[in-house]
Amino acid sequence: MHKKLLREKRKWEKPEISFWVLIGILVFSFFLNFWNIGQNGTGNSYYAACVKSMTQSWHNFFFVSFDPAGMVSVDKPPLGLWMQALSCKIFGYSGWAMLLPQAVSGTLSCLMIYLLVSKYFKKSTGLIAAFLFACTPSVVLVSRNNTMDMQLIFWLLLSIWFLMKSIDTGKWRWLFLCGVLVGVGFNVKMLQAYLIVPAVVVTYLIFTKGKVGKRFLAGAIAAVLMLGVSFAWVAAVDLTPASERPYVDSTSSNSVLELVFGHNGIERLVGEDRMNRGQSNFGKASGEKPSNGEMPAAGQGQQNGLAGGQNTNQTFSSTTSSASSAKSAAATDSRTFHASRMRNSKGMMQNGGGGNSIGTASPLRLWSNALYGQGSWLLLFAIASFVCCFSWKKLKRKDPLQRSLVFWGMWLLTAGVFFSFAGLFHPYYLCMIAPPVAALSGIGLTQLFRFFRNRWKKSKEEGYDFSARLPETLENTSETAQSVQKPQHLTLKFWKAQPWILLAVLLADIVISFLYVLHYESVPGWLAPLILVSGVAGTAVLALYLKNVRRGFFRMAVALLAVSMLAGSTYWAWTPVQTAPNATIPAAGPTSSALGGGMGGSRMPWDGQEGSPNRQDALSGSSTDKAIHRLPENGKSQFRESGMSSGLETYLKKNYKQGSFLLTACRSSSIAQMILDTGLPCYAYGGFLGSDNSLTVSKLKELVAQGKITYFLVSEQGGMGNTNSTLISYVEKNATPIDSSAYSNSSDRSEGTLYLFTK
């Protein structure tokens, strides 16, 4: 085929303007994802320490060991971290090298959105969808952090390309490749990758031609391949003797299979408290602040600055019991964030309660103050676009446009239901709804644009037919494409009320964004007026255009409404570029700062009203007496607590004994920064949550005898594992306490007590 093309000596054709627009969007996307990335340091120190440990040995690399000694792994699958470690191997260990794979994945995902949408709709539709995706706040946020969500989205979008190719050509091999790529996505963030599986299944079974039995057979084989790729690494780790690999973090049985269906599975759906973890997270019901200044993960008794209506500098008192109220009040002066666990009758986290403000579980949760700004700016319009463009008649004809609509609609439905009712996730997870929202919004906006652009041609008695020609690619002109018998023109018809419904919903989305921005405490003063004035002016000019049809009026109306529609989300997307968000639980928003993480001062008009179950009372506590300092752009973690932490690290390095652990502590947050600073082996026996059972008294004795455990930190913030009290008792009886004056100038011992084991 290529020889034939060479013989023809085709003339070089000048690229269409759509090509240059696409290049501009991709450059803009990468700018948002990577510009000023150095301000983020190494991002999440938990994963950053893991990547540093992985670069020290292939054993640590394969098992994603958190520490250089290979004692405990992290609570995520390997692929995303492998990409970060390989990037650091190529460019040297630094913050920007670790964050580069996410930034590239964000831009490649933007390209995939364009290819998937423009494959069946016009190129302009794909360009709009790609631009909307690039401007989604949660997309920019995770593209600039070392969480692996954006890598996951790229692999999923790539799998969709092969799903559509399989349906177009009738070839099973492309479906099998789709299943393999979903399995690859599983190895980035486990069960989160399966959020698109319902959409894949429904789309394939409905739109694939051939007998039903063959469809199910092909689907079954693809499912087997997906599961095989998904659990290949899981099986490799679990089949390795426990003595030859790290302990699997966030598990009680040292099994990756438990991690898949436990902490990263059912626990995400029903919530951590429903899994009867008790107080295992941080040991204290009042939610003590971690020793290294990090914010904990969801449900860990920390407030991440997302509570509706509360400033990030406010201190929240614990409401666990009246007996402990005096103690909690006394601790307020030395703790910045004390979280209350507010639950409804079903035990779900309430908005502003616990460590993860994700709002009350309900169909309206995605419009709550905690989540709206991350990815819901055009959610209502995306839903309306699907409803108005869907056609049962064309569905029966297996129309490719309807296939695309059904797929994006099913993805949005599945992910939307999960995030509306799940008990445990972080706000930045909403990047998972960004692809379907962008695609459906692009489709709806294009159809709405064309309807009003051709207003003067509209018939009063019947709907107007708007054709969307498939792009003329090699697939469309090949024999394979002809065998599928695609129509040359695919159409979407608007009848009667559909375009007016879309317009009304678009204006409603603009009103919602205006109200959201208006009630935000720290937003720039020009943003809300910009949304309001441009929205009102655009609506007025559009009305004038409908009365006196002139293209100048139409273009002006489109420009004004576009500004009004995109102003809020684009500004939210810009905030992570302008200011580094919280590294552990990042969130976009004007108040992104050292501890805030964004979304600190907003309250939607319908959210958290007086007397509602999700309203959180706040106390005006003083700020912490231990200042949190931003580190220079030197590749280190973004935040560090001054005083005891730095002094402790200096003391331990000075007294380090070769072949031993620099420090043994319960939680990974106590040693993550030390791993980043020194690269020396450390041991967090309780893992990220502080509840792992990796260390027993007998193992402790063995490690002490081998000279590996010397300095042991006993912290009030330690976990509550089954052997925790026994371990602590043994340490206190058999090790020598070190006076804190040896490593700290402060009398504050909130970090814990340091003990020394001697043979």
Image: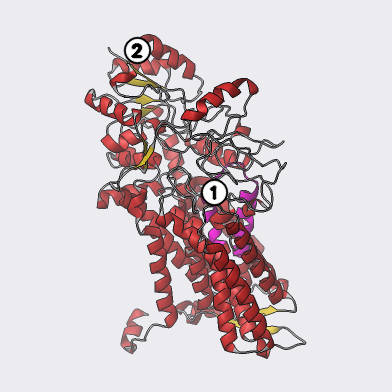
Lower position in the chain sequence, tag 1 or tag 2: 1
- Residue 211 seen in this snapshot: no
Q: Is residue 700 left or right of residue 75?
A: left
The overriding secondary structure of the stretch rendered in magenta is helix
Q: Is residue 9 left or right of residue 274?
A: left
| Position of the N terminus by quadrant | bottom left
Residue 411 magenta = yes
Residue in front for this viewpoint, 691 or 256: 691
Q: Which mark is residue 234?
A: none
In this figure, which residue is indicated by the disc labeled 1?
427
Residue 349 position, x and y percent, is 63, 39
| Position of the C terminus by quadrant | top left
Question: Residue 23 falls in which quadrant of the image?
Answer: bottom left
> Residue visible at 34% across and 30% down?
643
| Residue type, mark 1 in image | Pro
Residue 636 position, x and y percent, is 31, 43
Q: Is residue 184 above or below residue 108?
A: above
Q: Is residue 502 above or below residue 102?
A: below
> Residue visible at 37% across and 49% down?
40
Q: Which mark is residue 735?
A: 2
> Residue visible at 69% across and 46% down?
609
Label 1's element? Answer: helix
Q: Is residue 659 left or right of residue 702?
A: left
Which residue reaches farthest right?
A: 461
Residue bounds of the magenta highlight:
407-436
Residue in front for this viewpoint, 504 or 544: 544
Residue in front for this viewpoint, 472 or 268: 268
- Residue 311 seen in this snapshot: yes
